[in-house]
Image: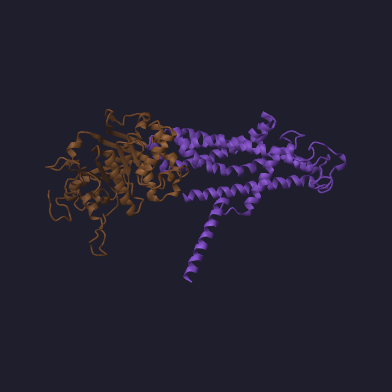
Chain colours: A purple, B brown
């Protein structure tokens, strides 16, 4: 009897040990929603990376016979007003969204993050001046600022990425500065100074690794917003020039056919909605995960 | 160890150190005219309650106070590591000072939970200063770091070194903090309340460890604490600080047997005694420590002192040497004549 109990105990603890290990490997508390969202993002990323090699039709080839055909007819997701394949256009359009999202957020992260860390570490006049400039940028209506920037530097993919990235500098500078302010107060920064570390070393070794987590976690959410901003530009006809397909451009073209062929606008809208939702969801879960880790330390 | 043999080679000599800091409320007189000397292999215990200026003093010795906060500083901090000539740290430019931090003097902080960077492996935190100050390469530094961890009593150091701070207990972390501080063999170690955040059994282990390492390396040590019990058996000299001043400074034995300052006496009486009957009322010092923004004239302890007289409120008592001794100093007009709770008075 006793033996049996003891055996059970052993078995149970071993099972618990296994599930704990499994949880460590597969991430505790992420749940299926996170993995579905992450899977969608992976799919979008793969489409963007391998658009040219995927077995989809030519996104620029108008087949007049298929004009405005609905989904699951001649084309899997239907055809647009010129008879171009919507699936192919989505796949190739994802390229623009992904490139702009990655570039713009990277620019904002690197430039804004650096400025924010410097402001939070050195304080004083530099911080005050920088924050004033950033407040001015933030106070500008972003669409007006963006239109001005695009008019100034052009409509290429890079130009638009840089323009949107510029808009993100203030937000990132603020996040980085706020985190730097709290990290600098910690005793380990003083301890590093007490061991003779130089300012550069403290910034790179002590401050940066602690600030980069919240900044990165904010990145995915920011990408979702960047995609929306890009599509707003495309809707106004100011994003990457036609005939290059973009999601925003597809929605914009589809609005002409809303009464007769809803799918032309609806399919890219749903695609974009799912992508932005996934970015927010994954970004949010990762952020809360990092927060928990920080409070555990 | 005898004082005479070591006094000749004092590692640290502080003369009239005065530090005033800017704060929102005004200028804080954090450290006022503090003087002491510390010889090689010796321990100075600095005792005082929170806000008495202990930590500010410790940080100013290493030049770690933010320049922005500094309203006024004066005095000398003369430091002499063995081969190098004596130098005044107060006059030294930051760049030069930086090369002394680590190899010449190091510091241990109060809370091991925050004194280690949570996102860096121990190996990184331990090897940083070795590579910077001693010019070791990655492999050498790693080997030395493992030796250091083993020396501070961390079992399985080779595996532990690749862990993150959160994988270690509080006592272990404090051992790591000590290992980092000792990495470059400093001649002066400042321990700012090294055991305050630890529980009592671990406290003893850490203090024993510090004592052992100090003996092995012949370091001078400043042990800052608010607990008279901690310094009683571990310090050669004890300085009692109150409101930024040293109010009594004596060899440890003398301080306990022949204390002169009423504040020292009050501190001593507030230690609960194990052989008191249970439910004995704890002795507290009435009142609160003074605020150090624009302090009033007179002895800072006077408002709380049971022996205070009119003169105490008007004049600041100078620090004087007890007649018949050469190393027992106090700052009181009406020193306590006999140590309380002591049966014989060898004054």
> What number of labels is visible?
0
Residue drawn at 41 percent across, 36 percent down: B141
Res. A283 visible in picture: yes
Of A214 and B132, the residue lying toward us: B132
- B196 relative to B269 in the view: left or right: right
Residue drawn at 79 percent across, 45 percent down: A264
Where does residue B301 sit, x and y in percent of width and height?
24, 48
Where does residue A151 sit, x and y in percent of width and height?
69, 30
Query: If the image is split into quadrants, where does the N terminus of chain B sit?
Result: top left
Of B250 and A169, the residue lying toward us: B250
Of B276 and B329, the residue lying toward us: B276
Res. A252 visible in picture: no
- A245 relative to B186 in the view: left or right: right
Where does residue B240 sit, x and y in percent of width and height?
24, 46
Instruction: Answer with the quarter of the image where residue B14 lies.
Output: top left
Q: Residue furthest right?
A: A65
- A70 relative to A143 in the view: left or right: right
Residue drawn at 43 percent across, 40 percent down: B125
Of B276 and B323, the residue lying toward us: B276
Q: Which residue lies furthest to the top in this view?
A: B85
Instruction: Answer with the quarter of the image where residue A86 lies.
Output: top right
């Amino acid at each position: 009897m006793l033996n049996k109990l003891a055996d059970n105990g052993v078995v149970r603890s071993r099972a618990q040990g296994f599930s704990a290990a499994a949880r460590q490997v597969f991430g505790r508390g992420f749940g299926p929603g996170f993995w579905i969202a992450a899977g969608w993002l992976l799919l979008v990323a793969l489409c963007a990376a391998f658009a040219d090699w995927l077995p989809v039709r030519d996104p620029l080839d108008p087949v007049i016979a298929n004009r405005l055909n609905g989904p699951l007819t001649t084309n899997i997701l239907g055809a647009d007003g010129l008879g171009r394949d919507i699936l192919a256009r989505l796949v190739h359009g994802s390229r623009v969204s992904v490139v702009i999202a990655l570039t713009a957020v990277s620019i904002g992260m690197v430039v804004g993050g650096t400025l924010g860390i410097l402001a939070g570490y050195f304080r004083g006049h530099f911080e005050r001046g920088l924050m004033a400039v950033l407040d001015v940028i933030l106070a500008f209506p972003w669409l007006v600022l963006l239109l001005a920037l695009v008019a100034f530097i052009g409509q290429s993919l890079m130009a638009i990425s840089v323009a949107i990235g510029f808009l993100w500098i203030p937000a990132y500078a603020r996040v980085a500065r706020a985190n730097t302010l709290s990290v600098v107060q910690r005793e380990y920064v003083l301890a590093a100074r007490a061991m003779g570390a130089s300012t550069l070393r403290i910034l790179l070794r002590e401050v940066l690794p602690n600030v980069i987590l919240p900044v990165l976690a904010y990145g995915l959410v920011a990408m979702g917003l960047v995609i929306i901003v890009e599509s707003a530009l495309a809707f106004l006809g100011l994003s990457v020039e036609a005939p290059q397909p973009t999601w925003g451009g597809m929605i914009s073209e589809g609005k002409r056919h809303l009464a007769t062929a809803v799918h032309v606008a609806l399919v890219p809208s749903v695609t974009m909605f799912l992508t932005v939702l996934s970015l927010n969801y994954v970004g949010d879960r990762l952020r809360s995960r990092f927060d928990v880790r920080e409070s555990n330390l | 160890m005898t004082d005479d043999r070591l006094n000749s080679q004092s590692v640290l000599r502080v003369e009239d150190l005065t530090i005033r800091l800017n704060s929102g409320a005004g200028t804080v007189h954090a450290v006022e005219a503090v003087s002491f000397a510390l010889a090689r292999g010796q321990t100075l215990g600095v005792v005082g309650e929170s806000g008495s200026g202990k930590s500010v003093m410790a940080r100013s010795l290493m030049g770690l106070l933010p320049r922005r906060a500094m309203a006024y500083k004066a005095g000398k901090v003369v430091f002499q590591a063995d081969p190098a000539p004596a130098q005044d740290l107060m006059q030294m430019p930051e760049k030069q000072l930086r090369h002394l931090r680590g190899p010449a003097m190091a510091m241990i902080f109060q809370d091991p939970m925050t004194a280690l960077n949570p996102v860096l492996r121990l190996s990184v935190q331990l090897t940083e200063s070795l590579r910077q100050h001693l010019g070791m390469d990655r492999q050498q530094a790693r080997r030395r770091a493992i030796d250091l961890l083993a020396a501070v009593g961390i079992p399985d150091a080779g595996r532990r070194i690749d862990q993150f701070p959160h994988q270690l207990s509080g006592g272990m972390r404090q051992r790591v903090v000590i290992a980092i501080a000792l990495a470059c063999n400093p001649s002066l170690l400042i321990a700012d309340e090294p055991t305050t955040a630890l529980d009592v059994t671990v406290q003893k282990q850490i203090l024993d460890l510090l004592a052992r390492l100090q003996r092995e390396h012949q370091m001078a040590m400043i042990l800052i604490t608010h607990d008279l019990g901690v310094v009683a058996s571990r310090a050669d000299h004890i300085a009692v600080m109150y409101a930024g001043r040293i109010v009594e400074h004596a060899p440890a034995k003398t301080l306990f047997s022949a204390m002169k300052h009423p504040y020292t006496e009050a501190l001593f009486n507030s230690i609960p005694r194990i052989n008191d009957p249970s439910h004995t009322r704890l002795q507290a010092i009435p009142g609160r420590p003074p605020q150090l923004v624009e302090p009033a004239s007179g002895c800072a302890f006077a408002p709380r002192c049971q022996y205070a007289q009119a003169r105490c409120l008007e004049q600041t008592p100078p620090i004087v040497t007890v007649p018949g001794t050469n190393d027992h100093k106090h700052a009181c007009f009406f020193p306590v004549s006999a140590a309380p709770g002591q049966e014989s008075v060898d004054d």
